[in-house]
Amino acid sequence: MADFVLLISDWYRLNARELPWRNTKNPYFIWLSEVILQQTRVDQGMNYYLKFIENYPTLNQLADADEEAILKLWQGLGYYSRARNLHKTAQQVRDEFNGAFPKTYHEIIQLKGIGPYTAAAISSFAFDLPHAVVDGNVYRILSRYYGIDEPIDTGKGKKLFQELADSLIPEAEPALFNQAIMEFGAIQCTPNNPDCESCVLNQSCISAFNSDLIKKLPVKKGKTKVRKRYFHYLHIEKGLEIALDQRTGKDVWEKLYEFPLIEREDDTMPLEFKDSASLSYQTKHILSHQHIYAFFYKSDETEIDGLDLKFVEKSQLEDYPIHRLMEKYLESR
Ligand code: SF4
């Protein structure tokens, strides 16, 4: 066990990538980077991180910002609820903690939208507290190294891996160990092609050079069901204006803007469009739990039965936060 910690920490000292959020103890910056990186590659996340700290250098500035401006800055990252939660949590810290990030794991995890992973990351990186992070990288390394086939997507499995990681984390340098194990997963013990040949753990890792085990671990019990949806959009221009709607309700892309939409159970053109519209673009857009089959029609009509059309200046279209699917369509023009 000591070897694992030692080897992985030494490996990190030699191989760590230089990343801007690694050179700070500012809990706001650390939190921001963690939220951005949750579902994003490091190279893509980097620009967003830099844009956010440039526009909102303090947590209070983020808290005071307009939600729409935050969504606009977030545009292209997807998972927009993360941006909205980021804003709400900043407001909570501003209002309940006088804008100073709380300093204990217990307080941090009470904040809205912050789960065990992010709380452990902030408390160890910013405050040197010994809380182990367990993300996809950590599940992968620990399951392969120790040969654990307990599914990682059950309460029992999560508890087991958290306890194991907690038992490994050294009191002296908790931040270094957390960084090391995540970096090791990102660079060395990767999902599909772990480099066992050059791996410092290959003498003691149960799965080393064993492609069957590597493929099998970590085990996931149930695959999430994917929902198929059919979005039919109408692209209508009227002089210098273009029809645009804001999404409402608890659904994907909440509060973002898009063309007027009719959602159907299938891919056939809605009756409302039949007389006036023609298909100009179609694509399949994949989200984590939904596959969206999108159809974009162009129409010269400025009134369509069943749709309450609202128009905005075409020249101002790029000021509105829009989702990736809309961006894809506009790029295709
Ligand atoms: S030996 Fe291979 S499977 Fe084991 S930790 Fe290293 S890279 Fe991963």
Image (spheres, rainbow, N blue to C red):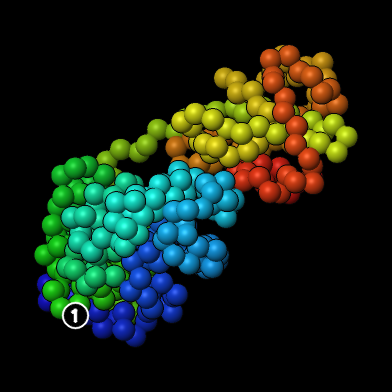
Q: Around disc 1, counting alpha carbons within 10 Å, would you say few (fewer than 14), some (14 to 19), or many (20 or more)?
A: few
Q: Left or right: where does residue 241 sit relative to residue 20?
A: right
Q: Quadrant of residue 81?
A: top left
> Viewer-proximal residue, 147 or 259?
259
Q: In this rendering, does residue 290 appear at all?
A: yes
Check the picture and name the quadrant holding the N terminus: bottom left
Q: Residue furthest right?
A: 239
Q: In this rendering, does residue 138 appear at all?
A: no
Check the picture and name the quadrant holding the C terminus: top right
Q: Residue at x 42, y 59 (%)?
A: 60
Q: Name the residue tied to disc 1.
A: 6
Looking at the rendered structure, the kind of residue marked 1 is: Leu
> Viewer-proximal residue, 78 or 211?
78
Q: Residue at x 20, y 49 (%)?
A: 158
SS category of the residue bearing label 1: helix
Q: Residue at x 66, y 32 (%)?
A: 245
Q: Residue at x 25, y 56 (%)?
A: 108
Q: Is residue 18 above or below residue 162?
A: below
Q: Is residue 4 above or below residue 60?
A: below
> Viewer-proximal residue, 85 or 14?
85
Q: Give the image location of residue 218, x and y in percent.
A: 27, 53
Q: Is residue 34 above or below residue 266?
A: below
Image mark count: 1
Q: Give the image location of residue 242, x and y in percent.
A: 78, 35
Q: Give the image location of residue 135, x and y in percent.
A: 30, 57
